Image (cartoon, rainbow, N blue to C red):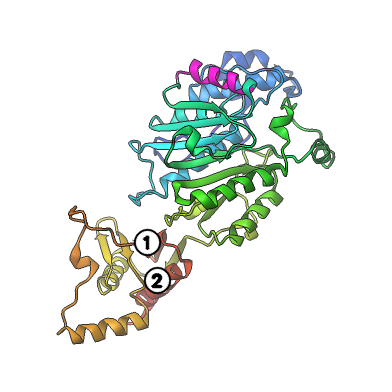
Amino acid sequence: MSQLSQTPATNQKPYYAQDVDFEDLAKRDPDWAAICKTSKQTKWIDFQDPKILLQLTKSLLKCDFNLTSLDLPDDRLCPPVPVRWNYVRWIQDLLDTTSDSYSDRYDAARQVVGLDIGVGASAIYPLLAASTRTEWRIAGTDVDQHSLDYARQNVESNGLSKQIKLALTTTDAPIIPMEALRLEELDFVMTNPPFYTSEADMQASYNGKNMAPSAVCTGSVNEMICPGGDVGFVLRILEQSLQLREKVQWYTAMLGKLSSLQQIVAKLKEHEITNFAVTCLQAGHKTKRWGVGWSFGDLRPRIDVARHGDLVHAVLPNPSAQTIAVPLMSTEWAGKKVDAALKELDVRWQWRAGSATGVMEATENVWSRAARRKKKFDGQQSGGKDVSMADEGEDDGDGEEEVPVALAVKIVASDEKVEVRWLRGADHMVFVSFCGMLKRALTAHE
């Protein structure tokens, strides 16, 4: 059985959704097969042995990502692959569903530049990102020269030096060192920060569990502990993001506890950052990690990305999709009603009847009663002539300044329902208002 969950054919590697199937991995990799110990009654693998933990990581990287070389010192973290890949995969989804094209799909030609803060000795995140997306370029930083030496070796031995560049930084330098890296903009920032505030905090975490850790921890102090733990580390990124703002499209972080996620989301709301996404990065039944991403842009991630995995209601962002039920009505009927309703508005509207899909952009709320009354009055004053965005058509490339978009949505009609996907906009209530108007248009009696 595959180690990875199945997704539609998109030429993308899917998330790990289940525990690693060690028997299947043994069939695919002789190095792992040599380590597995079996008996007639039971199968066991001693993950308290660092060598076994390292071999599992190496085998998964080789079999699932074609990364054939990994060398780590005995005194640095050996990263389990599944949760780390799920974090990278989630960032891919964030970017894919917040592109200017509104496609919601992976664009193999899109050039992406990202930053991993704290690459560690493995450089696991840059390796996973670069090996699965050839047009991605990843910068990586670390405060530990020992780890960085190994990271550079792992990048070079896997032939990814053209895509990955690593740099030493210091604890008092900007946590996102744009100037030092000679970068003007970034598509994303990612980090897997130390989870604990102190050795006592780390020990208390272990003592609070009913069972011993499933795998030995070989991490150094700087990999496991920092002032404020993961929350303190991510708050440093948040503070700098308030200065950089849209110079980075997505700021993201992995967190060790649900309570940490709750604290970060509360801080985002405190700063009135409404465009954020959350995820539970669980891979199988054991390890759970959480992720958060936020953006100062107005492109909205698809709802299954913004609210990904097993999460509590308190951390969820506003929904970026609504379903309007139209019982007993066909796709053709619903599509015609949608098309007719949108053609009455001063918006840019593209409708494809064949796929029953349309995209609408509006510069302001033009569907409210007040806006309709004003339109009618203005039409009377101008002798009935109305000029809409739809009349203007697409950008003719004459260099005129682009009009800001207050709301963009994708609408898909099907039998008995219409799906509305929020693509762009700063105000959730404008999206809700539009959905309300569309619902009235679809459910009004003839």
Q: In this rendering, does residue 294 appear at all?
A: no
Q: Nearer the viewer, residue 73 or 175?
A: 175
Instruction: Please report the residue visible at 29 percent of the width from the left and 62 percent of the height from the top.
Output: 403
Whole-Å distance between the Cαs marked 2 and 1? 9 Å
Which label belongs to residue 304? Answer: none
Q: Are marks 2 and 1 in contact (CB under 8 Å)?
A: yes
Mark 2 is surrounded, within 10 Å at the Cα level, by few (under 14), some (14 to 19) or many (20 or more) other residues, namely: some
Residue on which disc 1 sits: 409
Residue on which disc 2 sits: 434
Instruction: Please report the residue visible at 47 percent of the width from the left and 70 percent of the height from the top.
Output: 429
Mark 1 is surrounded, within 10 Å at the Cα level, by few (under 14), some (14 to 19) or many (20 or more) other residues, namely: many
Q: Is 338 situated above or below 273?
A: below
Name the image quarter holding residue 346.
Answer: bottom left
Name the image quarter holding residue 145.
Answer: top right
Instruction: Please report the residue visible at 43 percent of the width from the left and 26 percent of the height from the top.
Output: 163
Per the picture, the main secondary structure of the magenta-coloured stretch is helix
149 is within the stretch colored magenta: yes
Left/right of residue 83 with respect to residue 198 in the rendered view: left
User: Which comes sooner in the sequence, label 2 or label 1?
Assistant: 1
Name the image quarter holding residue 364.
Answer: bottom left
Left/right of residue 43 with respect to residue 141 in the rendered view: right
Q: Nearer the viewer, residue 56 or 34?
A: 56
Percent coordinates x, y for residue 19 in the rendering? 63, 34
Instruction: Please report the residue visible at 67 percent of the width from the left and 15 percent of the height from the top.
Output: 35
Secondary element at image label 1: strand
Residue type at the position of mark 2: Phe
Percent coordinates x, y for residue 263 in the rendering? 68, 54
Secondary element at image label 2: helix
Which region shows up in magenta?
A: 147-159
